[in-house]
Amino acid sequence: MILKLSELQSKDVVNISDGKKIGSIADATIDSNGTLISLTVLKGRFAISKKDEFSIQWGQIKKIGEDVILVDMN
């Protein structure tokens, strides 16, 4: 599957353990080999400070759907 960062940014991020929306994608971290390491998620619509964002590791992503990205935050 090939995805653009802009496509990921248009999707809501939802925790599969409780079904709650936890934010939206702001950025991605990619290593020197081009492998996606993590996604930076904003808790709200806009980050006011660093505490308004957090990282989700690639292994936590369970499914990338048409409208949402399902993650396991446990």
Image (spheres, rainbow, N blue to C red):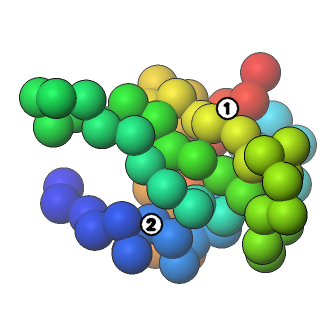
Residue at x 77% of width, y 21% of height:
74
Q: Earlier in the sequence, mark 2 or mark 1?
A: 2
**Residue 68 appears in view:** no
Residue at x 58% of width, y 47% of height:
40
- Gap in Å between the C-alphas at discs 2 and 1? 17 Å
Q: Position of residue 68 (x, y in %)?
A: 58, 65
Residue at x 11% of width, y 29% of height:
33
Viewer-nearest residue: 59 or 19 = 59
The image quarter containing residue 43 is bottom right
Labelled disc at residue 72: 1
Residue at x 74% of width, y 30% of height:
73
Viewer-nearest residue: 7 or 1 = 7
Residue 53's place in the image compared with 23, above or below, is above
| Mark 2 lies on residue | 8
Viewer-nearest residue: 47 or 23 = 47
**Residue 17 appears in view:** yes
Q: Amino acid at mark 1?
A: Asp
